[in-house]
Image (tube, rainbow, N blue to C red):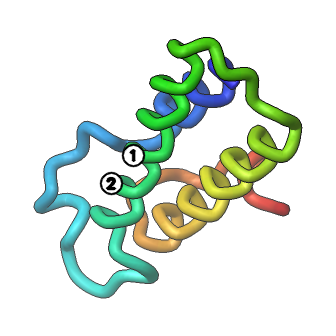
Amino acid sequence: MRQLIRQIREAMPFDAPEADLCSGHCHGCSFKLLEYLDIRLEEWEDRLARGEQPTLGDLHRLARTGKKIYRALEKNGLVEARPDLSRE
């Protein structure tokens, strides 16, 4: 789970200025999507710090959420297409 969280944090533009996230026509609000994902990641970081062990289902759900948000950001022109994240 820690590795998945690290990969998501590296792939997503969490540090992008809000003006870049909200610039014209969108396929989902990039700002809100990143905010939602950041909350989910922080929740899992807290849970892991408390010693909770994620299930395979937990890993799958977080990975799927990350992929869907990445695709939305790709459609909005905020990230480049990545073959390993382009399908599911």
Q: Nearer the viewer, mark 1 or mark 2?
A: 1
Count of picture labels: 2
Residue at the bottom extreme of this rendering? 25
Residue appearing at x 15%, y 49% in the figure:
17
**Which residue is the site of mark 2?**
35
Q: Which residue is mark 1?
A: 39
The answer to whether the residues at label 1 and label 2 have Cβ atoms under 8 Å apart is yes
Q: Nearer the viewer, residue 48 or 86?
A: 48
| Crowd tier of the residue under label 1, counting other residues whose Cα lies within 10 Å: few below 14, some 14–19, many 20 or above | few
Q: Quadrant of residue 1?
A: top right
As drawn, the label of residue 28 is none
Q: Is residue 63 above or below residue 75?
A: above
Up-down relation of residue 11 to residue 77 (above or below): above
70 relative to 3, above or below: below
Q: Quadrant of the C terminus?
A: bottom right
**Which x, y percent locates residue 56?**
87, 37
Q: Residue at x 42, y 79 (%)?
A: 28
Percent of width and height locating residue 53:
74, 22
Q: Position of residue 59 (x, y in %)?
A: 77, 39
Nearer to me, 19 or 60? 60
| Residue 30 located left or right of residue 80 | left
Would you say 14 lies left or right of 28 here? left
Kindly state the secondary structure of the residue where label 1 is placed: helix
Residue in the picture at 38% in, 54% down: 34
Disc 1 residue type (three-letter): Ile
- Could you say which is closer to the camera, residue 13 or residue 41? 41
* Pick the front one: 21 or 83: 21
Q: Amino acid at mark 2?
A: Glu
